[in-house]
Every structure is written in C-alpha cells, then in structure tokens.
Image (cartoon, grey):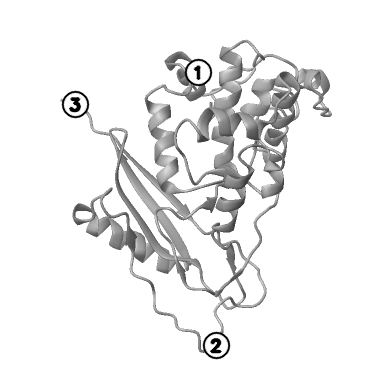
Amino acid sequence: MRKVWFLIIVLVITLPAGCGTPAVKPGQPTVEPAPTTMPGRVGAEPWGQFEAELETLRQQMKIPGMSAAVVKDGQLVWARGLGYANVENRVPATPETPYHLASVTKTFAAVIIMQLVQEGKLSLDDPVARYGVNLPEGDKVLVRHLMSHTSEGTPGQRFQYNGFRYGQLSQVVQAATGRSLQEWVYERIIHPLGMENTAPSPPAACAGLSFAPTCERVYAALTRLYCLDVDASPAPGYNGDYFNAGAGLMSTVVDLAKFDAALDANTLVTAATKELMWTPTVSNSGQKLPYG
C-alpha cells in the first residue's frame, strides 16, 4: 500500500508576554475577517473541520492572525489565512501573507552549508576559527558543532541550543566563499524555487544586491508583530532587524510548501546529504542527541 504523507505548515504572529498599550483602540470594530483561501489553487471543502479547529485554537491562544497550508505528496492542496495580519488597519491574513520566520531561517542556512560541503568549498570538520569565528573554546569548535548546537563546553559532548552561535555560520559562509549567506539563499533557494514572497530582512540586509527590490516589497507586506499586554490584549511588538544564519528570513506558507517539496524531492541537496542532515547527532560519549 502506498503511503500518503501530509505536511502541515502554520505561520503565526508571535505573541510573547509583556507589552505596552493595546493594539485595539476603544470603539474599534472587533469583527473577525472571513477566512481567506487561495481561489483556483487549493480546495476548501474537505478541510472544514481542520479549519474550524485552527480557528478555535487561534482564538483560545489570542493569536491575531495566522496562515496555514497542507502539502500532500509534494503538492499544495489547501491553504488558508485566519484573523488579521495587521490588527489596527484590519488587514486580513491570507496564504500569501509574509511572516518573520525567526529560527526557521536555520533550515535555509543549513541547506546552503550542506551544498557547499557537497561542492568541497568547506567541511563539517573545519574549525570555525579558520573562518574568523572566535569562540572561547577556540579551534576545537567545528562547523558541525555550530550546526548541531553542540559547541558549548566540551564541543560535541552535549546539546545546548544557541541561536547566537548558529548565527555565526553566516561568517563561515562569507569567509569560505567570498559571498554573503543572503546571496546564496536567494540564488540557490528562493529564486529557482519561485518563492516570490520570501526574502531576507530588513531591506538593509539586501542593500546593493540584485534582489533588493524583492526584500523591500516583502518587508512592506510583513505581518505586524504583536504580544499580549497586561490585559491579555494584542499590543504591538518588535521584529528584530537583522539577518544571519539563525534568523531573519520572511516567507509565506505557500512559499514554504515549495521549499518542503524541493527538500523531499532532493532538488536542493542529494539524497545522501539529506540523510546526513536528518540523522541525529551522536555525542563524543556515544549518546544520541535529539537533532541532526
């Protein structure tokens, strides 16, 4: 029997705690927008219950807006926007609404690094100090340690998530190739896959590059970030204005579906490389760690 695989992609407007004034002004209408589907590209009928459950979750969690997509056998079969991308201006969330990807950016950076490994431009066993990354552990920290979050203390011994250190892989890519990570991500992933609403942010990260207009366009349409204030009401938050291997990409659920399909089809890296990426890391002492 052939197995059918579904991937569900959900992007939400982040809601960390502790903010200032409420985003919804007194007297401002609170009517929710109708959910937005993509006409002609995805179906709605079979997904009514799933959509209702998402909407219930969104309201329970007080999420201003979210977008979701379902991929089946490499094809986008359903996508929906729920709530608002911008509460103050009542801009509905849609499947094409761009969100800050935050740490999902790491998956794009990992693909680029593994492509460079395939091409012999760098090695997972290279000391990152060779590329100008200076850490307290010195030249004992290898590229694979930063990628697997095992660089702290005795490198390779334990998993300790560190987004800042992962971000240093941008310097590794720059030093190894003479080109910025954002250039590689755009030219090898975003452009060839037709991810029209995906780009590094902020626009300053793309200054002087051929795809700078795309960065500006996507950034202008970016969802407004909110957090919950003391009354549990959505209040404006802040999107970090920086780009590196750890964070900074903007994208939509529709574009992420294209990225996932390309990974599944081994379009971006070879099957052997993908298997390596998917294989859990083993510590120096032989303990299987939770991530690749």
Q: Residues within 10 Å of mark 2 (few under 14, many from 20)?
A: few
Question: Does the residue at mark 3 contact the one at mark 2 (Cβ under 8 Å)?
Answer: no
Farthest residue in the left direction?
1
Residue toward you, 1 or 240: 240
- Residue at the (60%, 15%) spot, across then down: 117
Residue indicated by mark 2:
26
Can you tell which of label 2 and label 1 is closer to the viewer? 2
From the viewer's perspective, is residue 18 above or below residue 46? below
Across and down, in percent, residue 276 comes to: 50, 18
Picture quarter containing residue 212? top right
Give me the disc on residue 2: 3
Across and down, in percent, residue 112 comes to: 58, 26
Question: Does the residue at mark 3 contact the one at mark 1 (Cβ under 8 Å)?
Answer: no
- Residue at the (68%, 53%) spot, across then down: 240
From the viewer's perspective, is residue 177 above or below residue 85? above
Residue indicated by mark 1:
276
From the viewer's perspective, is residue 131 above or below residue 180? above
Mark 3 or mark 2, earlier in chain:
3
Give me the disc on residue 209: none
Q: Identify the amino acid type marked 2.
A: Pro
User: Which quarter of the rendering shows the N terminus?
Assistant: top left
